[in-house]
């Protein structure tokens, strides 16, 4: 527990209004996790507004060896919650300035409290020809910086890569109080136009570090052109192999800024299972009998173009590839998409991920869902689908999962969407058992978890890569000698030796 003397010292830094030891407020920070289930309650929540306040907090915490967990908004993935009891939860949401937008050098600079909705609205009003890389499907109140640091999925990932690939530079407060900038930003007076800077790349050390190396107070990231003509083409398939191979041929044409889909279970997954059971709609044939045609597997190709003619050309290319595969015997087709569904997908930021929380909710208990996300080569997509369909029912879960293209089919991001009852201990236990079992399988295939759960994926991965882990520990000790930054995350808890 943090002594009252520590609380008083921290109050002197941020003021009474921006620090609390209220238990309901402290506990509320644990309720936002969608990618982890292992959290502890902090002793105190502090909300700094500046780099200077952040420095003072970290210097004090470092001197007294108080653990610190930094959190941008807590809605990107849930990994930014304490893993050891007590300590400081550093809520950075008050640092919410959009500092710079440069459309010539094509970057923006934002603080960690800048939200997806805030930056999207700002661009639509001031820079309508440009797009900030906000995550797709995440809440409007989620953090742009948080999703970038987690190497998350953005609205343009299928074309440009994960958000971390677009990062150009960071401003970081180290636990010792030192402030560094990375990339070209490291040179005093230089703009953050170039990631690789004035020596070895330091930016990458903080991407995916889950707050274990320091506190990110500014992000410079690329922005991309926003095309005036947009549409979505829905493709249907009979097998995962058809989904994988047909889509790859289209993706090689560099078509699609956002290409995502999965099995037919994604359709009922956004509704309440209890109601669907009452209506007899947990069977794909029941949907088809009601003339709601649902393919076994589907992919949405969101396409952007400078002109209507270019948009039409992309659609024709998609249809041509599908027809070529049909001639070879594939059951692939281009399907009509309901205008409401199309509008929901094209809306940014959208909330398409949120309804999965309702799937297992009933009249007597609440629901919950866990996104367990993996990177793999696109050519392994069909195998990923088969594993999900085999393993999820073994643990009592319907096979709801999602796949998406990264960089025109170079990679796939695959995600079991585990819908469970958060109030049911057996259901929670089943989630963890499923996760551990499939993690072993996925790691055996050489696939990587991109937001490792603290006590599941991280130790399993590093057990297989001891040389890498040992080097990571050396970096950690260099930057955080007292081990105060997010101890336990990434299997790094130097507070306990």
Image (tube, rainbow, N blue to C red):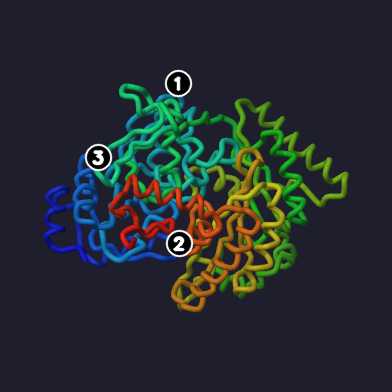
Rendering coords of residue 401 (x, y %)? 61, 59
Under circle 3, the secondary element is helix
Distance from the alpha carbon under mark 1 to that under mark 2? 39 Å
Q: Residue at x 37, y 54 (%)?
A: 74
Task: Name which of mark 3 and mark 1 comes first in the sequence.
Answer: 3
Mark 1 sits on what residue?
104
Residue 7, placed above or below residue 250: below
Q: Do we see residue 124 in this rendering?
A: no
Q: Of discs 1 and 2, which sits in the foreground?
A: 2
Task: Name which of mark 3 and mark 2 comes first in the sequence.
Answer: 2
Judged left or right of residue 65, residue 434 is right
Residue 65, placed above or below residue 396: above
Rendering coords of residue 63 (x, y %)? 20, 52
Q: Nearer the viewer, residue 421 or 184?
A: 184
Residues at marks 1 and 2 touching, judged by CB atoms closer than 8 Å: no
Mark 3 sits on what residue?
51
Dot label at residue 36: 2
Judged left or right of residue 416, residue 298 is right
């Amino acid at each position: 527990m943090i002594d009252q003397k520590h609380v008083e010292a921290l109050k002197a830094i941020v003021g009474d209004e921006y620090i609390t030891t209220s238990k309901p407020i402290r506990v509320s920070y644990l309720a936002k996790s969608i990618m982890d289930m292992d959290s502890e309650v902090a002793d105190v929540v502090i909300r700094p507004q500046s780099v200077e306040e952040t420095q003072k907090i970290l210097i004090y915490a470092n001197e007294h060896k108080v653990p610190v967990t930094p959190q941008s908004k807590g809605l990107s993935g849930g990994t930014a919650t304490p893993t050891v009891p007590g300590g400081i939860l550093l809520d950075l949401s008050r640092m919410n300035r959009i500092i710079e937008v440069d459309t010539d050098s094509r970057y923006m600079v934002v603080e960690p409290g800048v939200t997806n909705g805030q930056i999207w609205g700002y661009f639509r009003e001031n820079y309508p020809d440009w797009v900030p890389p906000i995550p797709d499907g995440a809440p409007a109140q989620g953090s742009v910086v948080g999703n970038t640091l987690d190497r998350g999925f953005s609205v343009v990932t299928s074309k440009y890569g994960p958000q971390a690939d677009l990062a150009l530079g960071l401003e970081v407060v180290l636990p010792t109080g030192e402030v560094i900038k990375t990339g070209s930003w490291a040179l005093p007076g230089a703009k953050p136009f170039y990631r690789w800077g004035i020596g070895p790349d330091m930016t990458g050390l903080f991407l995916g570090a889950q707050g274990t190396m320091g506190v990110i107070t500014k992000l410079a990231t690329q922005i991309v052109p926003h095309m005036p003509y947009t549409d979505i083409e829905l493709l249907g398939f009979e097998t995962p192999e058809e989904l994988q191979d047909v889509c790859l041929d289209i993706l090689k044409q560099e078509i699609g800024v956002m290409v995502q889909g999965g099995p037919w279970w994604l359709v009922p997954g956004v509704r309440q299972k209890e109601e669907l059971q009452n209506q007899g709609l947990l069977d794909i044939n029941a949907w088809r009998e009601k003339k709601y045609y649902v393919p076994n597997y589907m992919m949405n190709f969101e396409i952007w173009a400078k002109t209507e003619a270019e948009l039409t050309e992309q659609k024709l290319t998609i249809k041509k590839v599908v027809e070529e595969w049909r001639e070879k015997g594939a059951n692939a087709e281009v399907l009509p998409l309901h205008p409401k569904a199309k509008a929901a997908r094209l809306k940014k930021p959208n909330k398409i991920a949120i309804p999965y929380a309702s799937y297992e909710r009933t009249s007597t208990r609440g629901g919950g869902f866990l996104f367990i996300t993996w990177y793999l080569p696109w050519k392994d997509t069909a195998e990923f689908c088969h594993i999900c369909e085999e393993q999820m029912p073994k643990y009592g879960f319907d096979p709801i999962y999602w796949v998406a293209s990264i960089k025109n089919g170079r990679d796939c991001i695959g995600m079991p969407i585990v819908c469970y009852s958060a109030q049911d201990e057996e259901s929670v236990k089943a989630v963890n058992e499923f996760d551990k079992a499939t993690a072993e399988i996925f790691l055996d295939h050489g696939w990587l978890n991109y937001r490792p759960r603290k006590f599941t994926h991280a130790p399993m991965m590093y057990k297989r890569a001891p040389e890498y882990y040992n080097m990571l520990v050396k970096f950690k000790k260099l930057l955080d000698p007292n081990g105060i930054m997010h101890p336990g995350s990434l299997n790094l808890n130097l507070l306990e030796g």
